[in-house]
Amino acid sequence: MTEQLRDRWYALYVRSNFERTVEHCLKGKGYQAFSPFYQTWRKRTDRTKKLDLPLFPSYVFCNFNANERLPIVTTPGVVTIVGGGNIPEPIELSEIHSLQLVAESGRPVYPWPFLNPGQRIRIEAGPLAGSEGTLVKVKDEFRLVVSITLLQRSMAVVVDQDMVRPLFEKLSLAEVA
């Protein structure tokens, strides 16, 4: 194994609803581990209930030496360490640090769809609600690019990221085969 696998943060894929159990077991073994949660209200037929749900369902983040991963993978509830093949893929320290800061800030947090520049999107709210196009990032601003293919022309408008949702297009049978 290479030096880069030592003492890094990794994502562990765990059994459904085992995030807290795995986190508690790993901390009991002396590892740094966390699985951030958010609070939401869910309506039931007779009441409204406050729930704590994982921000990343079925994932726990853990700091360990990948050369010594046996204690990690034998932890009850752990399915696998996320990576390619049998090689765990470490998470960028800056991403983990940001995630911990936000999760521990005491401010309300909630899941958000992962958006990539170039992805097809739909605007869900505001005066642009219902418009579809491509997400582009220019100088820390997100823009909706709307194109007319026949004319090979496009236009762009700055959009608030909280009004954007990914647009999942259905694949044709030719694309699947």
Image (cartoon, helix red, strand yellow):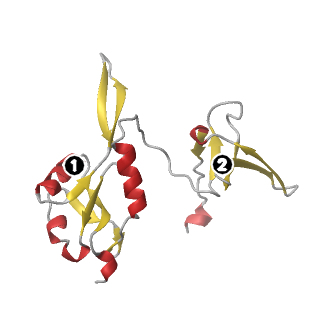
**Rendering coords of residue 147 (x, y %):** 79, 51
Image quadrant holding the N terminus, namely: bottom left
Residue in the image at 21% along x and 46% along y: 20
Q: Which mark is residue 142?
A: 2
Q: Is residue 137 left or right of residue 28?
A: right
CB under 8 Å between callouts 2 and 1? no
Q: Quadrant of residue 63?
A: bottom left
The percent position of residue 29, horizontal first and vertical second, equals 11, 59
Furthest residue toward bottom: 1
Image coordinates of residue 43 in percent, x first then y, are 36, 23
- What residue do we see at 65% from left, 58% from top? 118
Instruction: Decide which of 94, 56 is in the foreground and name it.
Output: 94
**Residue 62 falls in image quadrant:** bottom left
Give the quadrant of the C terminus: bottom right
Q: Which residue is located at x 30 percent, y 24 percent?
A: 49
> 86 and 62: which one is in front?
62
Residue located farthest toward the right when viewing the structure as drawn? 151
N-terminal of the two: label 2 or label 1? Answer: 1
Instruction: Name the residue located 62 percent from the left edge and 57 percent from the top edge.
Output: 117
How dense is the environment of label 2, judged by Cα within 10 Å: few (below 14), some, or many (20 and up)?
some
Relative to 65, is 38 above or below?
Answer: above
**For residue 153, which quarter of the picture?**
bottom right
| Residue furthest to the left | 28
In terms of secondary structure, where does tag 1 sit? loop
Left/right placement of residue 23 relative to residue 176 reads left
Instruction: Kindly identify the amino acid type of the residue bearing the numbered disc 2.
Output: Phe
Can you identify the residue that label 1 sits on?
A: 18
Identify the element where label 2 is drawn.
Answer: strand
- Above or below — where is 42 with respect to 91? above
| Number of numbered callouts drawn | 2
Can you give x and y, in whole percent of width and height, for residue 110 in the image?
42, 39
Would you say residue 59 is visible in this rendering?
Answer: yes
